[in-house]
Structure formats: structure tokens, C-alpha cells
Image (cartoon, helix red, strand yellow):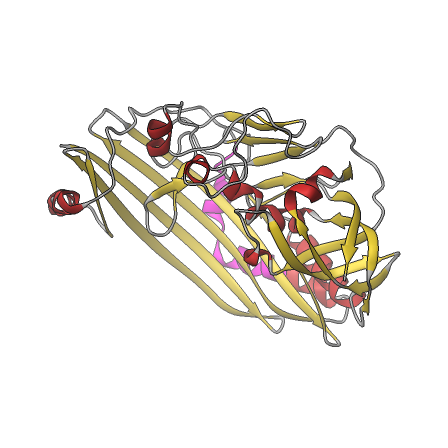
Amino acid sequence: MEWEIFEIEGISRCAKVEKGKLKVLEEWRDRKVGVRVIENGRVGFVTANYFTEDLIEKARKIAKISEEKLEMFPEGEYVSVEGIYDKEIERATPDEIKEFVDSMVNSALNYDVNPSNGMIELSIETVKLKNSFGADLEYKSTYCQAYLECVCDGSSGFEIDESRGLVDFEFVGRKSAELAVESKNPEKIEGVYNLVLSPIAVHQLLEFTLYPAISLENVLKGRSPLTEIGKNYLGRLSVIDDGTLSYGLCTAPFDDEGVGVREKVIFDGGVLKSYITDFRHSLIAKVEPTGNGFRGDDLYPTTSPTNVILEFDEVEKELEGVYVHSLIGAHTSNPVSGEFSLETMNAFLDGRPVRAMIYGNVYDLLKNITAFGKDIRQIENTITPSIEFEGVKFV
């Protein structure tokens, strides 16, 4: 029998805003443990709040009827990374968090809007992993997020900022208010225009189309159109997955299975070079694991991108077209085909607010990139500036 114990412990402090007022300021601690065993080549898995010896036996019983197979666990590798822990997050007091809220809300109130809802969250997370193959790993990280949505005469706008350290709270308040004010009474447009997606909108689109498709598991199971290494799928766009990126929101010294993270070129000038994978599917495909086995709420490892960096050979151009701050309906996109149908939110053409639907295929869209902007940001696991696309149909 082989075994693995994964433990994650977090401390979060969250301030919630409603109608411009601090509604709740709370702190909670959470600990979860996931135990996997391999018994006769089959996997058993259980979760709990704390580790006890009987979890091993429970996992062994599940392994007897499991259909999932695995030969081994990773031996464990720790990669040196920078910027994932900021002591200011851990030291922040409740009074300081209230000051952060005031800074964000007051920046919005300067625009005569209603800061209808928002939040500021500061969290500290400790990850530990041990297994019978010798892995004994641990790291600590911090995270800060600020979000605010403002309403003005029936119009709304939101902004978000995330960092391993403290974020720009005034920016979040100011930008969300500006979007609410400037988006009033949008005009319906139709026709063909250049499209400019903000970093937020770029992430919303790729999260549900491109990212599932670069998973080796989905390729092996026929759930991805990216079947040919060496084929150009994205025109001139390069895509890099880098779990070692300094200060990256998804940087870690190892993934949640104990595989050391690394930088991987997924697309080079549009040409598919590699996939990302968890440990189990790397064994199935007989390829090197990429350090992309991460765990969600259920604590079972699945393939997930780290810091996805978008690069293009023309940058720092003043972008022109219909600017879209965010998209509605991205979660309904088809990751198998890349098809999407999206509604624009906080969109502008020549400075005036507009609204429309856009339909298409993400691979066709990414082949029609004309330029990158200057405003590089990280939104969740995507690092990108605003991007201009040529000849998009609006309906």
C-alpha cells in the first residue's frame, strides 16, 4: 500500500460592503485534509477536517471498489519561488481593514454613485503534503482581493484587484464608480467592428474556452480540439504557463501533488508546443508531469493552469474599437469546440456607452489579434493587457 496526506489550512479576514457601508467584518479558520492510498494499483480517497489514522483504512476500503488506477505518487520536489508571502497581510488589524474599506468606498462616493456591494478579503494559507514515496513539503502564502460594484441611475460597473500583498483599494472604488457613471443608457449596436477586451474580459473568455482545452486529460478523452502538436491554432499569440513567476497569484513551489512547478511554453507564435497535466495523466500518456495538479474544494487533484502569460509580437499600441470591460455568459462557452455567445458589459465605442452580443469561436478570434495594449494585469490566473481583435461581428 502507498499513501498520501494533503493538508491545507487557511485564515481569512473578510469585510463585506453593502450600500456603501461596512456590513460585516469577520474572520474564520479552515482546515481540510485529503488522504489518498494506492492498493493493488487502485486509488482510494477520503477527506476530513483533521487527520486521523482511521482515514487510511477508510481510503483502503474505497480503493477495493475504485475504478481509478495509479501506479505511484510523486517523490516530491520543492522549487524556489519569490513573492508569494507578504507579512503585511498577516499583520493587518481589523482597524486597518476598516480603513481599507473606507478608502475604497470613499473613492467611489466622489462620483455620486451607490457602492451597492463589495468585499475586501485578506487570507493566509499553509499547504502541507507527505507521501510514502518520500515527499515532505510545505509552504505558506498570502492573498488580498478587493471587489466593488457601483450603481448609478440603473447602470452598474465593477472592478477587482488581486495581489499577494495589499492591493490598490482606491483604484477599485474609483474605477467601479467611473464605469457605472459612464455606462448609463447604452446604445444597442450591430455590425462589424474591431473589439478591445480588457484584461478582465480576456480572462473571462479564456477561462472557459482555451484553458480546458490545453489540459492533457481533456485531450486524451477527446474533449479538446487541440490534438496536433506543431499545428498553428492561435495565429501569432504565444501562451506560457509559469508556476514559478515571482509574485504570481498562482505561483507555488510545488503543485498539490508534490510535483515541482516550472515554466511551460504552450503556444509559441500560435503553434501548439505542449499541454499541462496532473501527475496521473502524465503517467498515462508517458510524459513528464508539468506541475499542474491542483485541488479544489473537494481536495482531489485535477489539471489546472498556474500563471498564464499571453504574449504578442506587437505591443504598446493605442487600441481602437469597441472596448469591453467585462463579459456576461462566459461560463456557457463550449470548451470542446471553442464556441461562445457573450453579452458585453460596460462597453464603449468612441467614448459613448454601447451594448451588444458577440458570437464566435475562440480560435478564430485569437487568430485575428491586431495588437496588445499597455495595461498588463493579472486577473486570477491570466496575465495580459487589453487586446484588440479585428473584424468582430456585433449583433
Q: Nearer the viewer, residue 142 or 258?
A: 258
The answer to whether 330 appears left or right of 56 in the picture is: right
The secondary structure that dominates the magenta segment is helix
Q: Quadrant of the N terminus?
A: top left
Residue at the (66%, 59%) spot, across then down: 342
Q: Quadrant of residue 376?
A: top right
Q: Is residue 29 visible?
A: yes
Q: Nearer the viewer, residue 156 or 368?
A: 368
Residue at the (23%, 31%) spot, across then down: 131
Residue at the (48%, 27%) spot, across then down: 81
Q: Position of residue 352 (x, y in %)?
A: 86, 62
110 lies above or below 331: below
322 lies above or below 215: below
Tell me which segment is drawn in magenta: 83-102
Q: Position of residue 382 (x, y in %)?
A: 59, 41
Q: Quadrant of the C terminus?
A: bottom right
Q: Is residue 160 visible?
A: no
Say if the magenta span includes residue 14: no
Say if the magenta span includes residue 100: yes
52 lies above or below 346: above
Q: Position of residue 240 (x, y in %)?
A: 58, 30
- Residue ranking furthest to the bottom: 153
Q: Nearer the viewer, residue 123 or 368?
A: 368
The answer to whether 361 appears left or right of 273 in the picture is: right
The number of numbered badges drawn on the structure is: 0
The answer to whether 214 appears left or right of 6 in the picture is: right
Q: Quadrant of residue 57?
A: top left
Q: Position of residue 335 (x, y in %)?
A: 53, 48
Residue at the (80%, 35%) spot, across then down: 316
